[in-house]
């Protein structure tokens, strides 16, 4: 058995797969079970009682994590004139228009999120088929198509996470790093779950939050006690 396989096996032995864990205990186990040499990302997966094939059951939105993501988020902004200056002053990494479109058409994607002013969407539309599959297309529903570019840039830099339910009814979202203090991870997890609850479609029937699990990049998944999580916000 390889060294990494042994570490994974040891991590698995720390977890009872038949048990649901209170939030605090789950975070402690994830931190203890992490074994990679790098600072693993902690992710939450939430199974929702929706059918995303129906437009009125789509769950999509964004939330600014109270404790950030623990990484430098590279922000690109499509803007011109005063809005270009506003984006630069707010800390955007790249700001422009047709010049950025041309770079992206050539295969450049060295950014994590894209923001656009509404008047630039005609330009951005030229590369929609390149940005869309990568989850980088600006969208007014998550606040990335806006004239408030300064605010949008600062939120992205602070740890704004976009979420969208997948075909299987699951939402995946990063909530920080294993090096984070446990209470910071807990705060970020609660922020994500609360945002999902607020985004519940009126067409969703029955149990909405069906399952919540937590894992690090290399670690096994841990099932959370839903009632414990939702009682904290």
Image (cartoon, rainbow, N blue to C red):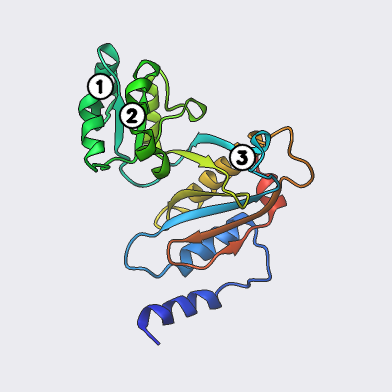
Out of 198 and 131, give the one closest to the viewer: 131
State the quadrant of the N terminus: bottom left
* Number of the front mark, 2 or 3: 2
Q: Is residue 112 left or right of residue 105?
A: right
Which residue does the numbered mark 3 point to in the structure image? 196
Please rate how many residues cluster around mark 2, counting C-alpha atoms within 10 Å: few if below 14, some from 14 to 19, many from 20: some
Identify the residue at image location x=63%, y=71%. 17
The answer to whether residue 153 of the structure is visible from this angle is no
- How far is the residue under mark 2 from the one under mark 3? 31 Å
Q: Which mark is residue 126?
A: 2
List x then y, in percent, for residue 77.
30, 27
Mark 2 touching mark 1, by CB under 8 A?
A: no
Identify the residue at image location x=27%, y=29%. 92
The answer to whether residue 223 of the structure is visible from this angle is yes
Q: Which mark is residue 89?
A: 1
List x then y, in percent, for residue 127.
33, 33
Q: Earlier in the sequence, mark 2 or mark 1?
A: 1
List x then y, in percent, for residue 146.
42, 20
Q: At numbered mark 3, what does the secondary structure look like: helix, strand or loop?
A: helix
* Number of the front mark, 2 or 1: 2
- How far is the residue under mark 2 from the one under mark 1? 27 Å
């Amino acid at each position: 058995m390889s060294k990494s396989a042994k570490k994974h096996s040891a991590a698995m032995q720390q977890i009872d797969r038949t048990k649901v864990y209170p939030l605090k205990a789950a975070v402690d186990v994830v931190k203890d079970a992490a074994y990679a040499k790098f600072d693993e990302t902690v992710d939450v997966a939430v199974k929702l009682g929706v059918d995303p094939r129906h437009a009125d059951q789509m769950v999509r939105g964004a939330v600014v994590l109270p404790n950030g993501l623990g990484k430098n988020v590279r922000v690109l902004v499509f803007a011109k004139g005063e809005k270009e200056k506003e984006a630069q002053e707010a800390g955007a990494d790249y700001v422009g228009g047709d010049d950025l479109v041309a770079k992206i058409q050539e295969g450049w994607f060295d950014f994590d999120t894209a923001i656009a002013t509404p008047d630039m969407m005609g330009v951005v539309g030229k590369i929609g088929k390149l940005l869309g599959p990568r989850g980088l297309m600006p969208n007014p529903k998550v606040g990335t198509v806006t004239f408030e570019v300064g605010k949008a840039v600062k939120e992205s830099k602070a740890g704004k996470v976009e979420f969208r339910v997948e075909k299987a009814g699951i939402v995946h979202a990063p909530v920080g790093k294993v090096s984070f203090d446990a209470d910071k991870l807990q705060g970020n997890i609660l922020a994500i779950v609360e945002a999902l609850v607020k985004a519940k479609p009126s067409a969703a029937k029955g149990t909405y939050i069906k399952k919540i699990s937590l894992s690090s990049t290399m670690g096994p998944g841990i099932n959370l006690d839903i009632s414990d999580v939702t009682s904290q916000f």
